[in-house]
Amino acid sequence: MANGFARSKQEQTDWQPANADEYKQVLSIISPQLYPYVTEHAELSTLMDEVREGFDRDVYRTALDAIGEELEHHFRYEEEFILSKLANHIPTEEAGPIKKLKSEHQIIRDRHAEVSKLLGESPSEESDKELMQKMNLLAYLLKKHIEKEDHYFFPLVSLVLTEAEKDQIAVEIAAENRHSDK
Ligand SMILES: [Fe+2]
Ligand SMILES: [Fe+2]
């Protein structure tokens, strides 16, 4: 199956592969307590580059599993640990970063459920085409979400939250990780 046809024009021109030098620069403008989030972004971003290489059910399955895992943990930790503290400084969820970040998470959750369902259906030329299209769109949405968080959200959150709030986030992540290691 040709690689390009299942993508919109924007998806074709707007893709930036994971870049180690840029990643280092990003870390230099983010507080260390928030590094676990950015590290997970880098892994996920590389996986989305693989999805983009072409139609491959095994790669799609691995990617969907990894995204599913992130929805359970990473997305939830952002909402519960970071957004709850950002609300001390941005006192509305009617507009602004808290609202938009949550709504992007919901869009990605919905898309993930949709693509996972498609992957479970029996293969046919028609359904493979739809699967590829929707998988590519999910990868694109996630890639853009990660870019937004790495380049805007986390650098700004690093400046806005107090040191005590950021320390608390590190404690909360560590506690969850200990819990899930059991
Ligand atoms: Fe996120
Ligand atoms: Fe994230």
Image (cartoon, rainbow, N blue to C red):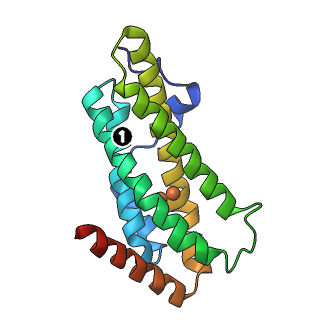
Q: Nearer the viewer, residue 173 or 17?
A: 173
For label 1, the residue is 64
Task: Look at the numbered disc 1 and give the secondary structure of its residue.
Answer: helix
- On the rendered structure, is 160 left or right of 180? right
Residue 122 vertical position relative to residue 49 in the rendered view, above or below: above
Image quarter where the N terminus lies is top left
Q: Position of residue 123 (x, y in %)?
A: 33, 15
Q: Is residue 88 visible?
A: yes
**Residue at coordinates 53% horizontally, 50% vertically from top-left?**
145
Q: Position of residue 32 (x, y in %)?
A: 41, 78
Q: Residue furthest bottom?
A: 164
- The count of marks equals 1
Q: Residue furthest top?
A: 125
Amino acid type shown at disc 1: Leu
Residue 79 vertical position relative to residue 53 in the rendered view, above or below: below
Q: Nearer the viewer, residue 40 or 180?
A: 180
Residue 36 vertical position relative to residue 55 in the rendered view, above or below: below
Query: Label 1 neighbourhood size at 10 Å, few (<14), some (14-19), many (20+)?
Result: many
Q: Position of residue 85 (x, y in %)?
A: 59, 78
Image quarter where the C terminus lies is bottom left
Label 1 CB-ligand 1 distance < 8 A: no
- On the rendered structure, is 87 left or right of 94? left
Residue 2 falls in which quadrant of the image?
top left
**Residue at coordinates 59% horizontally, 50% vertically from top-left?**
104
Q: Is residue 22 visible?
A: no
- On the rendered structure, is 94 left or right of 80? right
Q: Nearer the viewer, residue 155 or 87?
A: 87
**Residue at coordinates 74% horizontally, 74% vertically from top-left?**
91
**Residue at coordinates 75% horizontally, 69% vertically from top-left?**
92
- On the rendered structure, is 67 left or right of 14? left
Q: Position of residue 114 (x, y in %)?
A: 48, 33
